[in-house]
Amino acid sequence: MSDEQDLGITESKEYSPGDWYAEVVQKAELASYGPEAMGGFIVVRPRGYALWESLQEHLDTWFKQTGAENASFPMFIPESYLEREKDIVEGFDPEVAWVTHGGYEELEERLAVRPTSESIIAPYMAKWVRSHRDLPLRLNQWNSVVRWEATDTKPFFRTREFLWQEGHTAHASDEEAWAETTLRLDQYQRLYEDVLGIPVLRGQKPEHDKFPGAKATTTVEALMPDGKSVQGGTSHHLGQSFAEAFDITFADEDEVERTAHTTSWGLSWRALGALIMTHSDDQGLVLPPTMAPEQVVIVPIWQEDTKEDVLQYSSEIAAELESSGVRVHLDDRDERNPGFKFNEWELKGVPVRFEIGPNEVEDEEVTVVHRPDGENTVEDRAGVLEWTAEHLDAVYDKLYDAAYENLTENVREASDRADLLGTLGQHKGYVKAPWCGDEACEGEIKDQIHAEIVMVPFEDDAVARTASEFEGERVPEPEHGPEDDCVVCGEDAATTAFFAKSY
Amino acid sequence: MSDEQDLGITESKEYSPGDWYAEVVQKAELASYGPEAMGGFIVVRPRGYALWESLQEHLDTWFKQTGAENASFPMFIPESYLEREKDIVEGFDPEVAWVTHGGYEELEERLAVRPTSESIIAPYMAKWVRSHRDLPLRLNQWNSVVRWEATDTKPFFRTREFLWQEGHTAHASDEEAWAETTLRLDQYQRLYEDVLGIPVLRGQKPEHDKFPGAKATTTVEALMPDGKSVQGGTSHHLGQSFAEAFDITFADEDEVERTAHTTSWGLSWRALGALIMTHSDDQGLVLPPTMAPEQVVIVPIWQEDTKEDVLQYSSEIAAELESSGVRVHLDDRDERNPGFKFNEWELKGVPVRFEIGPNEVEDEEVTVVHRPDGENTVEDRAGVLEWTAEHLDAVYDKLYDAAYENLTENVREASDRADLLGTLGQHKGYVKAPWCGDEACEGEIKDQIHAEIVMVPFEDDAVARTASEFEGERVPEPEHGPEDDCVVCGEDAATTAFFAKSY
């Protein structure tokens, strides 16, 4: 980025969030749009891909610690395989990109570019699983998939090809498959809350919005500053539908042949979209220190006669931080002035800036500035490792707290249709209300205000194991039952639903 | 793998190398064949993928240390982009898989599933490069590509989809592009020699066998035990052909607009094929400790009355090794006897086995067995960390030395056509001979004996920078010139060529 005028963000997060988001993504050099002939595709540039690598490193470590192993299945799926599980083919057929020719020859059978891999992994599971000793079988792959949806491209949020991980497991019992489903949801929640700085709500998708063929689809939902909900990652209990369609059976301990229970779970680069949109501002990208490629940037401020001392002092500090594992960058470019550097690193989202001039050198101090709010402090050189860690934690907490406040301030209640429509129309965020469970009631709201049911809180029995781990704080219990009236039709309610506009 | 009879390798490496290779790959659970409708595709299972991850970790670290950054470009390329560089379209068109439909609609323009990404990366380089300050630009991506070749599938060696990395760089001068080309070739050589335990020869592909559009294609070649050469990784100096076709220009320091010089370099999972084929034997997979997912397996040997002591002693040793970073596995399964475990871990290629029974516990010793040759030693418990490191190094050296011997014993010379054909027919490996540089002379040999020119040693001027780093040992200098006669046609020789059968 060589032109000064490129550095400023011109759009406003508050007044034109869509344009502002697109501008941040491009000017922070995270991604570019794909070729004109390929609407819906993006190019992820090194600064964007570094975020994906950081996310991968966290999730991949947790997956491996909990028994999942990485593998690699073909990117194509024969049409006949896709057709073996009827819900999958119905669910994905309208969105499949088809390979019809190899070289100069037309293929005998069309190949789907995978929209998701259940249909090609399940037949291999069927081969590899013979006995109860082969279970659980836990596979994961990091790859890209293609879904030919509408082309209103929004980098990371809505793209026809996206990077993700997809986990696929097989188990001996329904209980074990449930435990797996919630274990992966826990890991997604942990990624959002402990790494991305974004609190999430946990729950299930309504019956009609589940993954094709699934018994249950669990989700973590994040609230964006513009008031829309993002489905942050989903973990599916597939029951026995895939195991039956693909013959995944095993000889149990009692020698009886039984059908396995499977799960699948996926998290895509949409998580990066949520990250960028949640924390960034009108100066550009804002990143939590957990994710930032550079956690600290040191900007030295010198005149000709002080240059040597300032650079010497700065590079000693950089070396000390680096040797203790802090990702630090010393911006010693000659051809740029400090103000330019401040703007550039603000745009690129470096969480903590050290300003070091002759005064700092003389007083053996460092001026420390936080990215999200410009708060600055002067610290003693001596304790640099300790207070750097504290500043990085403080920045993380500021970002998380702001997102948490946005979430908790934007969960409202409604008791009838007018109230529901009014609240969804006037406010950002979620409306929690009793619901009869009928798709038609959601449909009516969708038609009128483009909001939908993004989540139904868990039933106790399904997730007793994990709800407690999170102190119930963001795992709302279903508060409503037959004693309440559905917010739309007025019939007996079956549960609580969270309505919201969503990405 | 639950059935005992699955554990043995039945084919012979010496007498039926093709079947033996396929059996090792499957029984060591590295890979399976793809769906029947998809000849040429494979599924990489966790034990195979772990090898890829290990390889990635090494190369990716070196790439990043030397200025390359990872990015992600779309998996499709519009046909019109592919056509912009004529050599690329001629070279790859016969092998492209085409996407013609998205959902229920026929696409206006066909999309190629990338066979390689120059044609979609170059136009972005053209956008991002404006000034000499934007150079060098060094991008890399880890992905999979598709080349619709003949379907005689050989896992990792010959597959229609394969995993690889592809690096793409742009530079201000021809010299810098050359330096980049050889830097990456150095890294490939380092991977083979320091990680995979395989010595390689370095050189250039003959003019007619270069990457489409390239000025030069450099290669590392590895000799397999069956006598065929494997192209282990290639690094291309693309000259200005792509930069001209896609307008990659920059304002130089003197303000003059100049055309950039580009390179690309790729290494695929074929490296894993070379790894498996080089070291493995009739007992199964053999891996160097650098690559093995488990470097040490501990097999405890107990009777009921000694079980507790043996397991206690074994797990203390496992913990000590693990805490110092050794990848160790304690096989404490009750339902398998030690002999079964020995066979299983031999099949799976664990380099070093510890056998621990009551005698070892009493004498505070460990029996140590090397995988490649069964050599065993009794060591004192006390120095376990030191001597484990020594044994791992010793196993690496054994593997490397055997491969080195195979290579050096199988480079022969020939001075005329009969000699060349005879030597290629009777012996494994390379024949080094003077060559006039004419494709027709190679063609004649190809027709008669299916051997080809796999490499031409570097000219001094092109690689003076790097040849010295490797002491010239495996960078043969061209020994032949106009004073010699081409081994095929007898005309004046232009250089030295290495003939071999190849994968």
Image: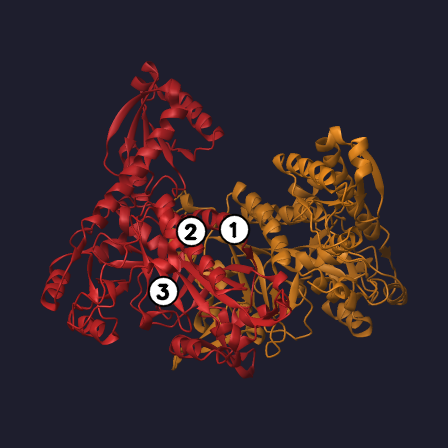
Chain colours: A orange, B red
Q: Are marks 3 and 2 on the same chain?
A: yes
Seen in the picture, residue A297 relative to B478 is either above or below; the reply is above
Which one is in front in this view, the residue at disc 3 or the one at disc 2?
2
Q: Which amino acid type is marked by label 2?
A: Gln
Give the Cα separation between the discs numbered 3 and 1: 30 Å
Give the camera-side residue of A426 and B80: B80
Residue drawn where x is 77% and y is 55% of the image: A340
Residue A114, position as x, y percentages in the image: 51, 67
Q: Is residue A444 left or right of residue A35?
A: right
Separation of marks 3 and 2 at Cα, in angstroms: 24 Å
The chain ID associated with circle 1 is: B
Left-right relation of B5 to A84? left
* Tags 2 and 1 on a common chain: yes
Check the image and report above or below for A339 versus B205: above
Q: Measuring 75% from the left and 60% from the top, which residue is drawn there?
A: A229
The mark lying in front, picked from 3 and 1, is: 1
The residue wearing badge 3 is B159
Q: Badge 2 is on which residue?
A: B187
Foreground residue, A232 or B474?
B474
**SS at circle 1:** loop
How many numbered dots are placed on residues in this image? 3
Please name the amino acid that badge 3 sits on: Thr
Residue B118: percent from the left, percent from the top?
49, 69
Comes first in the chain, label 3 or label 2: 3
Q: Amino acid at mark 1?
A: Thr
Please give the chain letter of the residue carrying mark 3: B
* Foreground pick, A252 / B18: B18
Helix, strand or loop under label 2 = helix
Residue A222 image offset from top left, x and y in percent: 74, 55
Q: Are marks 2 and 1 in contact (CB under 8 Å)?
A: yes
Mark 1 sits on what residue? B66
